[in-house]
Structure formats: C-alpha cells, structure tokens
C-alpha cells in the first residue's frame, strides 16, 4: 500500500458512537428532510465533530465530494469516481491483497468517519489516506486504462457511470492539487463517506434515518 501517516489507534474510526445530539435532532424534524450531505454538514458543525480540522463529505449516491476548512467553509466541490461495487463495508483483509485478487463485488468504497492525512502510495505518489488498513485513499484520477474512460466519466452530468475504481476515491487532478492537498497540508482531517445501502443512522449513530440512505 504505502507509508501510513496515522497511528493505528487513530485509524479505527469507522462508526460514530456519538448520540448527544438527540434533543437537537428531535427539536428540528425538518433536518431529516434535508439532502443527506446537507444533514451531515449541519450535524458536523453543530457537534463540532471535526474539532476544528478540515473535513470532506463524500456523497456516494451523487458521486460528489465537498471539501471544507476547519470552520466549515466550503473550499470546493467536484464529481468523483468511486468503487465499482455498491456497498458500505470493506471485505476483511482486503488492504493486504493485490488488485488482481479483489473480486468485482468487493470493490466498494466504505462508508463511515475516517481520520485522514496525506501520505504516499506504493508508487510514491502523494495521496490522501482515508482508511489505510483497507487501502482506501483519495487521489488524482488514474487515466492509464483507456477502456476505463475515467476522465469522460467525471465529465458526464450523471452519477451512474462514476463507479469504476477498486474502492479508492478518484478526483480531477486540478481539484486534488488546488483543493484537497492544500486543505490537508501539514494537518490531519476527517473524511465522512455517506452510505448508499445502509441507513445513515446505522453508520452515523447521532443522525436520524434518511430517505436517501435506506
């Protein structure tokens, strides 16, 4: 995979255990009618869950990414390419396998809350490690495979053709270099990946069920 910039004890953050915002959510039922990414943002800012660190929201259903600074100000948004298989979990031990050993149904982008930091992959390219143990990173779009048509997929308005990777999150080169990398330079941050098959409340315990994610 590459060199992990995050100690193992800080990488075990797949599911939020916070449930302190129940009264806030109950008092504002309209929040549950927001788009899932807007609900996620409102909760992050209200709970200060990012603890002043930069953060990213990945909306798998919409194949979109939004990058925010530590104060919650939007720095940029972009289409993304995601794992070719739908699903919100990673297969155990998948981070230790070669790409050729990963079955099509295992090529998922896992949902959850991840402490992320810049690092290097095996090719020594700089990437944002999202979940090092499962080899999930955010990186510049890979364009080597002509048949994959990754640049064309990013350019289409539909999210339906944005499922092509082994699980990593591909972003346009300029977006990585101008938005993602500067946001996480010399600091860790948080990446929130919204679920697509599980209820959002199952992945993020403080949030109510949402029609987009159940």
Image: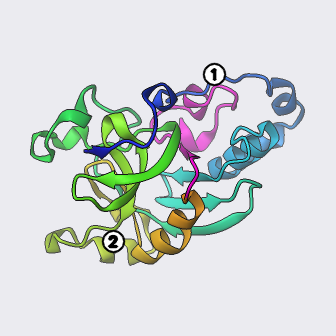
Q: Seen in the image, is 183 located left or right of residue 81?
A: right
What range of the chain is rendered magenta? 186-214
Q: Which residue is mark 1?
A: 17
Percent from the top left, x then y, of residue 73? 74, 62
Sequence-first disc among 1 and 2: 1
Q: Residue at x 38, y 72 (%)?
A: 154
| The one of 35 and 142 positioned closer to us in this rendering | 142
Residue 194 lies in the magenta stretch: yes
| The one of 6 and 41 positioned closer to us in this rendering | 6
Q: Residue at x 32, y 45 (%)?
A: 3
Regarding residue 156, the answer to whether it shows in the image is no
- As drawn, which residue projects farthest toward the right? 27
Crowding at label 1, few (<14), some or many (≥20) Cα neighbours within 10 Å? Answer: few
Q: Residue at x 64, y 53 (%)?
A: 54
Crowding at label 2, few (<14), some or many (≥20) Cα neighbours within 10 Å? Answer: some
Q: Which residue is mark 2?
A: 153
Between the C-alphas of marks 1 and 2, the distance is 36 Å
Mark 1: secondary structure: loop
Q: Seen in the image, is 142 located left or right of residue 70?
A: left
| The one of 90 and 156 positioned closer to us in this rendering | 90
Q: Quadrant of residue 147?
A: bottom left
Q: Residue at x 49, y 48 (%)?
A: 117
Percent from the top left, x then y, of residue 198? 49, 32
Contact? badges 1 and 2 (CB < 8 Å): no
Mark 2: secondary structure: helix
Q: How many marks?
A: 2
């Amino acid at each position: 995979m590459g060199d992990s910039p995050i100690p193992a004890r800080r990488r075990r953050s797949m599911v939020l255990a916070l449930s302190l915002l129940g009264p806030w959510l109950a008092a504002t039922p309209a929040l549950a009618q927001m788009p899932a990414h807007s609900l996620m943002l409102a909760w992050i800012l209200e709970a200060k869950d990012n603890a002043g660190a930069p953060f990213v929201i990945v909306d798998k259903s919409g194949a979109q990414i939004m990058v925010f600074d530590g104060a919650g100000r939007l720095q940029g948004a972009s289409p993304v390419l995601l794992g070719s298989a739908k699903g919100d979990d990673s297969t155990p031990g998948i981070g230790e396998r070669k790409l050729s050993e990963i079955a099509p149904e295992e090529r998922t982008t896992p949902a959850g809350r991840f402490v992320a930091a810049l690092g290097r992959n095996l090719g020594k390219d700089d990437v944002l490690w999202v979940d090092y143990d499962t080899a999930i990173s955010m990186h510049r779009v890979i364009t080597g495979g002509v048949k994959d048509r990754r640049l064309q997929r990013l350019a289409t308005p539909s999210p339906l053709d944005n499922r092509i990777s082994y699980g990593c999150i591909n972003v346009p080169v300029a977006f990585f270099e101008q938005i993602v990398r500067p946001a996480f330079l010399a600091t860790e941050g948080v990446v929130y990946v919204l679920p697509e098959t599980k209820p959002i409340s199952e992945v993020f315990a403080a949030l109510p069920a949402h029609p987009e994610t159940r």
